[in-house]
Amino acid sequence: MSGVQTSAPGSPVARRGRLTYLGGRIAEYVVVLLVALTLNFLLPRALPGGPLKLFGSPEALARLTAEERAQIATEYGFGDPIWVQFLDYLKSVVTLDLGTSLSDGREVTAAIWDALPWTLLLVGTSIVFTTLIGIALGVIGGLRRREGKGAFTLIGAIVVDSIPQFWLAMLLIVWFGVKWQIAPTFGATGPDGVTITGLAQHLAMPVATLTITGIGYIFMYTRSSMLNVLTSEPVQHAHARGIPRGRLVRRHVLRPALLPVHTLIMLDIGFLAAGAIVVETVFAYPGLGRLTFGAIAARDYPLMQGTFLVLTLMVVLMNLLADLTYPLLDPRARTGASER
Amino acid sequence: MLVGRCHAWMLVPPPGIEQVTDSPFALPTFDSPPYGEAHVAVYPWEVLVQFPGWKFASSSVAVLALTLTACGGGGSTPPPGNSQETADSVTIAIASDEGTLTPFTNQTGYPGNNLVKLIFDTLAVVQGDEVIGLLAQEIQTEDNQTFTLPLRDGLTWHDGEELTADDVVFSVEFYRDHAEGDSAVDVSMIEDVSADGSTVTMVLDQPDPEFPRMILSDMAILPEHLWADVTKVSEAGTDLAVGSGPYVLEKYDNARGYTLTANPDYALGEVKVDTLKVAIIPEESTQFAALRTGEIDMSTRIVPPQQLDQLQSQANIGIVDGTEYASSLLLFNNGRAPFDDPTVRRAITQAIDTQDLVDTSLLGSGTIGNPGFIHPASPMAAGDTGSAYDLEAANAALDELGAKPGADGIRVLDGKPMSFELLVQSTSTDRLRSAELIREMLREVGIEVKVTSMDSDSLDAKVWPDYDVSQGRNYDMSMWGWSAPVMLSSGLIAQLLYSDPAKGPLNVVGFSDPETDAALDGLTSEETLEGRIDAAADLQTRIAEQAPWVTLYYRDGAYAFRSDTYSGWTWQDGKSALHGFSFVDYDL
């Protein structure tokens, strides 16, 4: 059955439709963001323990009188009623003044600025490798689905996808770090400061870990999408009309097959920043993941809220970006046409 | 304020003190509290300074490709070392960030406090079993109540200012007003402090023979000219990490941890290691891997017993080991039946083979627990009360209480099956193993134990909510441990047992016994060390009888280091190997 909307692309009706669509999506994202912000505020406070432990050894804290405890809580803002804290938090988000870390007195914004570039470098690099390798293998796996290699690749991808990041990271450290000594085991820079060689060496194993554990997902999604398109009626017709296989794949299969993968990759970018927590901790990489891990361990509410905010914004922004860029890639989304 | 700026000088570090230069890639700055000259931020794009035409967008791809050709040498080879007794540079690894390394901003007792004490000297220091003067030439007292402390000559702060007796007086007053902070010291017992020339006099509210060990050796002296206007100590920046100790905090950055350099004007001895780098590596396994490759020279993580042989067998790796005063305990909630009955607590104590725990959980790297709690090597030790393990006696005691086994073999006491939950920290391998072994051991006497592992914070919230024993507790039994300082002071030992929460803020088991309270009064009012040791002997007999908890074992300390870089590590009981004596040839 053909499309339900008949307005020509670029007509006033179509433009109004797109604006309504865009407005609706943005409104949805605002609601999502508000819910996420509320959770970001509540989750740290739902954890057992609290930030009091940052103010001394347990033995020293035990000696504090009730008045001294109240004074510390009031001074650092975690003794106020919960709704007052929430309003303060919302205000801090709006003004982008995220407060001061309770652990070390640093501005939360500054701490995030220090850490974010390292995570972007790590995640960005691994996304490039994961995407290229995952898509390439997925396309090959889809085209050769009936050959032995295709099934073998699928099983391999499932196995790789199941590998825990922590375990793989330790394995790489033991082999490449300790046994063969061809990559440093921790950190982001060498003793000479920030150099290309040092950055590359220190990125090698964290990126390899994220890439290997991320390939399987994209591979399986690409392969599945390829199979759907290859078995669709238009492609079958094209095949019956005698269009050469190479041209068929390039012009009629790849683009529709990679559309869902595009959305997946956009979402992955957002989630990988959070997923780098394990890798950054194991490799002592000074990024946002390690900052988040430290903040949670210390129950540093302002820092937790700050890092959670960045992770939330990354996920939401990537979703929005995926939504906005999808029509550029898919003409059906541009015209509102749909196929049933 | 330097946070958020890039520094071109990072690319080619000059020798000596590093300079700060703005780069064209500077990020916006923030209105944060003064973080100090020593704090710098490092960013990956600093490589762009080397390659102005470099396209950042393509760098991600190229970076890993370069690795294939570039990582054949460099970072993974062991660092060059000097002779073993001195070194140009030593890198140690710690598990987590320790803030700005002032006495109010370090996060942990070990290794945080140890690092702070390399920057800030104290009036006295513990050497072996003795307390000797450090900043103070000697410790003079006739009655353990009035302490006269003449300071040494030529003492200076890292910024060149003279260290005076007024700084010491200021420090005492400052600690009195600021109790928060991991390395903050409780000075409430100091009734009066005064300076006369270069001599400080402290008068206590009552005689305390442990004052030199517990306070004078622990109180980091602060420079008045820098700290006088500080009100919010938890936000103290690196500009306040200026002490008079053997090391100067040179740099603290988010990428590489800390750099400490030898204090060139240190008057109390010769510093043996020029530069001490401190890397932050959260994962224990990564720390030991980095040690094996030579990327670090010492790990502050205790070597797990199962890895000890493997590490020791590797060339160029040495182990420094000794007595740790930290204890591992099995707590009873003394306020909850049937643990409110000392007979039940004692019977459970008798059913636990602590030697088996040491042999199995620690692979022998530990000392079995003294039923009287006090470590046999503690300054307060007065003999061992011997092992309490006696399975027959445990069964007989439970039989006598009328706790008969039910159909499932579990004893029933007062109509309730003796089935209890045992909490254990999920992050502690030896305690997890011990908890499982205890479950098996108690099954032998008809007591069922359900082991529940949880993260430390969740466990703390049940055992010691808000670190305030007056809030009560919510557990049956729990694995627990006290850090070394608790074992070194009769005052802290007393705080474990006093029934009044104000006097017993560490009484996490809710133990209450008027006779013990009276014994504790006697202990803490003794005016001589000998008197306190005698009183402690009586106390440990009482602890063994009352069994408010089971003292399972004291884990030995073992730390690994690269002997090809530096082997001057020395052991100090209670402080492990990270202290001044490992780095300084003192002339005291």
Image: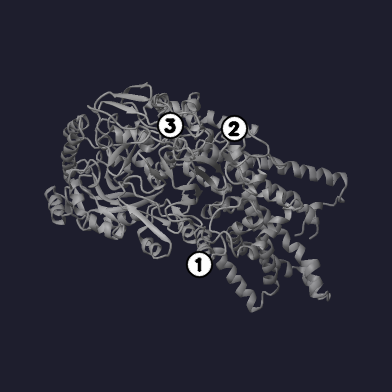
Give the SS element for disc 3: loop
Q: According to the image, what is the colour scheme of the structure?
A: one colour
| Amino acid type, mark 2 | Ser
For numbered disc 2, what is the local secondary structure? loop
Q: Distance between the residues labelled 3 and 1?
A: 51 Å
Residue A135 vs B483, above or below: the answer is: below
Residue situated in front as seen by the camera: B373 or A70: B373
Q: Which of B279 and B553 is in front in this view?
A: B279
Figure quadrant of the N terminus of chain B: top right
A131 to the left or right of B496: right
Question: For this view, does A251 lie left or right of residue B230?
Answer: right
Residue for badge 2? B32
User: What residue is at 82 percent from the left and 75 percent from the top?
Assistant: A244
Q: Nearer the viewer, residue B388 or B322?
A: B322
Q: How many C-alpha atoms fall within 10 Å of the one at disc 2: few (<14), some, or many (≥20)? A: some
Residue at 66% in and 64% down: A134
Give a yes or no on whether discs 3 and 2 share a subunit.
yes
Q: Which of marks 3 and 2 is nearer the N terminus?
A: 2
- Check the residue under mark 3 and report the chain it is in: B
Q: How crowded is mark 1: few (under 14 residues within 10 Å), some or many (20 or more)?
A: few
Q: Nearer the viewer, mark 1 or mark 2?
A: 1
Quarter assignment of residue B244 = top left
Residue A250, horizontal then vertical, whole percent: 79, 68
Cα distance in 3D space between marks 3 and 2: 36 Å
Residue named by callout 3: B154
Q: In this view, does B71 lie to the left or right of B474?
A: right
Residue B160's tag is none
Question: What residue type is disc 3 on?
Answer: Gly
Identity of the amino acid at label 1? Lys
SS at mark 1 in the image:
helix
Residue receiving disc 1: A179
